Amino acid sequence: MLRIAVIWKHAGRDASTSYNEVHAPSVLPTNLDASKFKGIVDKGTITEEWARPPPGQTTELKLNERPPLESVIAAQDFEDIAERTVSKKTWAFYSSADTGCLTRDRNKDFFGRIWFRPRLVRDVSSVDTRTKILGHDAGMPLFVSPAAMAKFIHPEGEKDIARGCVPTRIPQGVSTNAAFPIDEIMAAVPRDAKHPFFFQLYVNKDRKKSEALLKHVQSLGVDTVFVTVDGPVPGKREADERVKADEGISSPMSGAKGSNDKKGGGLGRVMGSYIAPDFTWREFDWLRKHWRGKIVVKGVQCWQDAKICAVAGLDGVLLSNHGGRNLDTSPPAIMTLLECQANCPEIFEKLEVFVDGGIRRGHDILKALCLGATAVGMGRPFLYAVNYGQEGVEHFIDILKTELATAMALVGITDLSQCHAGLVSTLDVDHLVSRGETHPYATGRRKGNEGNVKARL
Ligand code: FNR
């Protein structure tokens, strides 16, 4: 039956390629009688129609052409397509990371070093990926990590990300540097959907500007702010510096503008120049005064800072290195999660722990949850998905949800409350988990630098 279908598909066309893909050259002479040999094709008689691939077969794409959305089946596909189809500057801005890009790449690689330990022979006929994130119902333990300027890749940018998140109820983090004001992003989805939005704050050098922004966002009904702390100064994103910036672009909420200077055209650097380098833990009192809702600290990279957030009674901590964009060789985000488990496991009961950086699969989400995370964020993948607008975002979330549900069934759980650390093995990376306050053996001090020990701790 199958063979007939293949013959039908190629009727009137050249089937050599499809045939040769699955048959060894010896199949014909050993299975067909020599009397069936009809002769050799006269190549001069080959028409254009005969040489064309059969309908429905994947064809070579032209440069800058996006394949049909239904042929996209993984986060990596969206990324590859973005690389081929967006402008040089957009690709440089989105994909770049600090200096050698080691942290960006290791974020992803380290998920591959954690292995599942499936428990089988259980009834997994019905799997539920729903959960709660910071008090909001969510279709799965995932939110959009705030990322600047989604409009570069699609005219509806953050608005289409919002629309695409509604059907599965994926909370959206909106950046201070978003391409649209948060009012417009929230207005893009039906009000009665009560869709969850989180606002990401970069504290401004001019605190009055931050105060006004927080007041405005709060008046829109947003109940959670993510305060990003991992970029008091900008990283050096060389790919972004190398491509000239369009000087006409600007971000409406921060007022930041694109420009070029002697260092290059790095949008991250230039557009982040308003961010306060002097914001400290002490100012969380100031923040509480101007924000009555929940507070999550984004960009924590060691257990000590995560513990400060828990002791201070904050609502959450996002273990993140900004997708490797700020400090190269800062630890892969999943390693920071392990570090928290090793040094201060009590914090997981005090606040919600989130992770972002390098998450590309439903499997990665499940691993983070087994290791204690409430949910994970994704940055670049949502930007690459919105290349296809709202539909792309919906399709991307469906892919992840299916991957997550399948992975859950295959490790033997049907509900996220059944996640536990026994379902994963971290043996491959355990020796890399930092423990304690200081370096385990490097106690020698540089000559002339004996003082100031307190500052070092
Ligand atoms: C970001 N990120 C970010 N974070 C933030 O707090 N405010 C921001 O404005 C931005 N802007 C931004 C722009 C772009 C182009 C990227 C790629 C990232 C960081 C983001 O929230 C998140 O931490 C990382 O993207 C997570 O890593 P992955 O998922 O991209 O690997």
Image: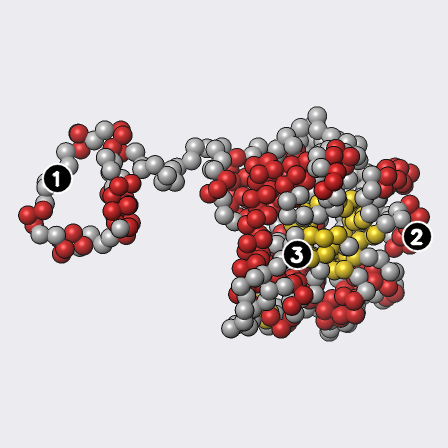
Query: Which mark's residue is nearer the viewer, 1 or 3?
Result: 3
For this view, does 150 lie left or right of residue 74?
right
Q: Position of residue 372 (x, y in %)?
A: 70, 65
Dot placed on the residue nearer the N-terminal end, 1 or 2:
1
Q: Amino acid at mark 2?
A: Asp
Residue under label 1: 40
Query: Which mark's residue is nearer the viewer, 2 or 3?
Result: 3
Of residue 347 and residue 139, the one placed in the foreground of this image is: 139
Of residue 400 and residue 187, the one placed in the foreground of this image is: 187
Dot placed on the residue nearer the N-terminal end, 2 or 3:
3
Q: Position of residue 126 (x, y in %)?
A: 56, 62
Residue under label 2: 285
* Residue lying at 74% horizontally and 34% vertically, measured from the top left: 187
Give the Cα distance between marks 2 and 3.
Answer: 34 Å
Residue under label 3: 130
Q: Secondary structure at mark 2?
A: helix
Q: Amino acid at mark 3?
A: Arg
